[in-house]
């Protein structure tokens, strides 16, 4: 079964165009050209007044004092979408938000390090710390905004109550995401990890199989392609969205809000050290953590993205 599953997934990947990983901090670098996005929402600072509304009730276009421009490098989903919503609020405060979408995880950090951009929004803290250590950069967390919970999703079986010996469960094979997947399986009583394995756990740290399942390790972007063949798959929120799934509607189980993984893998606004208290950065973080943006996230992503 393992050989067949991996073969089917490999075949599907080679037949498809090369996709871009959107998993924060876990994708491979791609030689791509960033795309500057000027969201339609950012071009207006308020709703148009009703036709019969008194003119005095609508503030003049120049009533808001211009405070400056905030430039942010971001991943497409969900980061640039959340920023587009935030731009409407920032505009009412006098800030112009300019977002450039990148589809790799190297350039967004490089352009902030060089101060070409004020901030980026695409990564979690472990990736940020690893990047600093490897690249000699000086990036810091200016504020945690959201996390993307891992979920267990149905493959050939529709309920965890039906799990049985011999079932195959597809999980990501990179260190960060495999650990999260295995911890979630442990939380649901399927296996037990070696004490202390935590967020560095791999299959070698599985101490006991409470159900004698077979863990199939695949590249993170390939796990969703195993849905037709594996009994269950464990997906990050981004890849669940790509597969047309939602944590709130479709996950058989998912990471709790107060889990170690949720706290660790919160996606942050990153800036170059020394700029975390800049006026524009503080305004950006405040808006992204506002009730309005939390409501937007909750209503838009159906649990695949969770405000922090």
Image: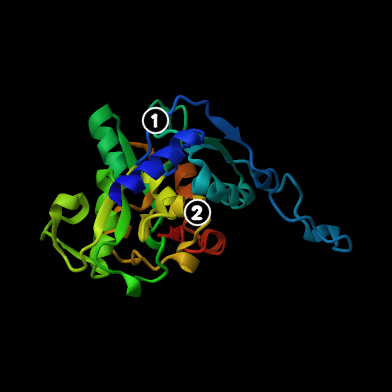
Left-right relation of 130 to 94: left
- Nearer the observer: mark 2 or 1; the answer is 2
Look at the picture and state if 133 lies above or below 182: above
Query: Looking at the rendered structure, which numbered label has been put on residue 241?
Result: 2
Look at the picture and state if 8 lies above or below 207: above
Disc 1 on helix, strand or loop? loop
Q: CA distance from mark 2 to mark 1?
A: 21 Å
Residue 201 in view: no
**Nearer the observer, 68 or 154:** 154
**Residue 8 location in percent, x, y?**
40, 44
At a point 71% along the width and 48% down the height, the residue shown is 63
**Residue 162 location in percent, x, y?**
34, 73
> What residue would you read off at disc 1?
29
Residue 163 in view: yes
At a point 24% along the width and 61% down the height, the residue shown is 213
At a point 38% along the width and 49% down the height, the residue shown is 223
Mark 2 or 1 closer to N-term? 1
């Amino acid at each position: 079964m393992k050989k067949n599953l991996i073969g089917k997934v490999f075949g599907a990947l080679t037949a498809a165009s090369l996709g871009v990983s959107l998993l924060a901090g876990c994708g491979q670098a791609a030689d791509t050209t960033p795309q500057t996005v000027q969201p339609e929402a950012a071009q207006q600072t308020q709703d148009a007044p009703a036709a019969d509304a008194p003119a005095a009730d609508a503030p003049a276009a120049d009533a808001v004092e211009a405070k400056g421009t905030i430039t942010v490098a971001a991943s497409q989903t969900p980061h640039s979408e959340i920023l587009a919503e935030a731009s409407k609020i920032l505009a009412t405060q006098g800030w112009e938000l300019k977002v450039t979408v990148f589809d790799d995880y190297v350039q967004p950090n490089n352009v902030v390090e060089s101060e070409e951009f004020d901030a980026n929004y695409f990564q979690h803290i472990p990736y940020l710390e690893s990047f600093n250590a490897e690249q000699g950069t000086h990036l810091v967390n200016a504020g945690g905004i959201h996390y993307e919970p891992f979920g267990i999703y149905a493959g050939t079986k529709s309920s965890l109550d039906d799990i049985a010996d011999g079932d195959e469960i597809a999980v990501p094979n990179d260190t960060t995401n495999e650990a999260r997947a295995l911890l979630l399986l442990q939380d649901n009583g399927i296996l037990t990890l070696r004490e202390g394995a935590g967020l560095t756990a791999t299959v070698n740290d599985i101490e006991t199989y409470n159900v004698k399942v077979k863990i199939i390790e695949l590249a993170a972007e390939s796990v969703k392609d195993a849905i037709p063949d594996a009994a269950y798959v464990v997906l990050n929120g981004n890849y669940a969205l790509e597969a047309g799934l939602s944590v709130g509607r479709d996950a058989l189980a998912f990471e709790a809000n107060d889990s170690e993984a949720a706290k660790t893998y919160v996606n942050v606004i990153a800036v170059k050290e020394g700029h975390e208290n800049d006026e524009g950065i503080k305004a950006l973080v405040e808006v992204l953590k506002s009730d309005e943006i939390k409501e937007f996230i909750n209503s838009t992503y159906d649990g695949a993205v969770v405000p922090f």
